[in-house]
Image (cartoon, rainbow, N blue to C red):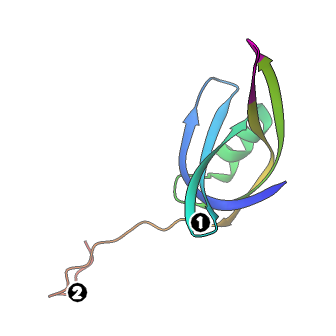
Amino acid sequence: MVVVGKILNIINATDKVMQVVIRVKKDDIYLPVAFVCFTEIKALICQLRIEKGDYVKITYYLKSKKFDEHYSTSAIVQKISITQKGTNQLMVDMETGEIM
């Protein structure tokens, strides 16, 4: 499965696991979705310098595990690429036009 969205947060869970939270639009609502990244994808994120605010395309699969008679499902990243780099917001003084 493939999804495109803006990165809201990148969380280093352990040395080998990272979570990437992106904002995805469904109908007229924006929803946060968390994806799990393991060693190779975590290294790729660091290599590509993917950061909060970037727009990314993620190819992923779903995996469920049974825990105490309940199931938990994870969205695991197979590939990630940058579709658009986020821009830093600049403040502009409207009277002088000075960029701060």
User: Which percent across, then down, holds residue 18?
Assistant: 65, 34
Could you tell me which residue is drawn at 27 percent across and 77 percent down?
A: 99
- The amino acid at mark 1 is Lys
30 lies left or right of 5: left
* Mark 2–mark 1 distance (CA, rounded to whole Å): 25 Å
Circle 1 residues within 10 Å: few <14, some 14–19, many ≥20: some
Q: Within the image, what quadrant is residue 78 found in? A: top right
Quadrant location, the N terminus:
bottom right
Q: Is residue 5 above or below residue 43?
A: below
Could you tell me which residue is drawn at 70 percent across and 25 percent down?
A: 16
User: Which percent across, then down, holds residue 2?
Assistant: 81, 57
69 lies left or right of 85: right
Q: Furthest residue to the top?
A: 68
- Front position in the image: 62 or 38: 62
Q: Report the residue marked by disc 2.
A: 97
User: Which percent across, then down, holds residue 84?
Assistant: 63, 69
Could you tell me which residue is drawn at 38 percent across and 68 percent down?
A: 89
User: Which residues fall within the magenta stretch?
Assistant: 67-72
Label 1 secondary element: loop
Label 2 secondary element: loop
- Front position in the image: 52 or 22: 22
- The amino acid at mark 2 is Gly
Q: In this view, does 98 lie above or below 71?
A: below
Q: Report the residue marked by disc 1.
A: 85
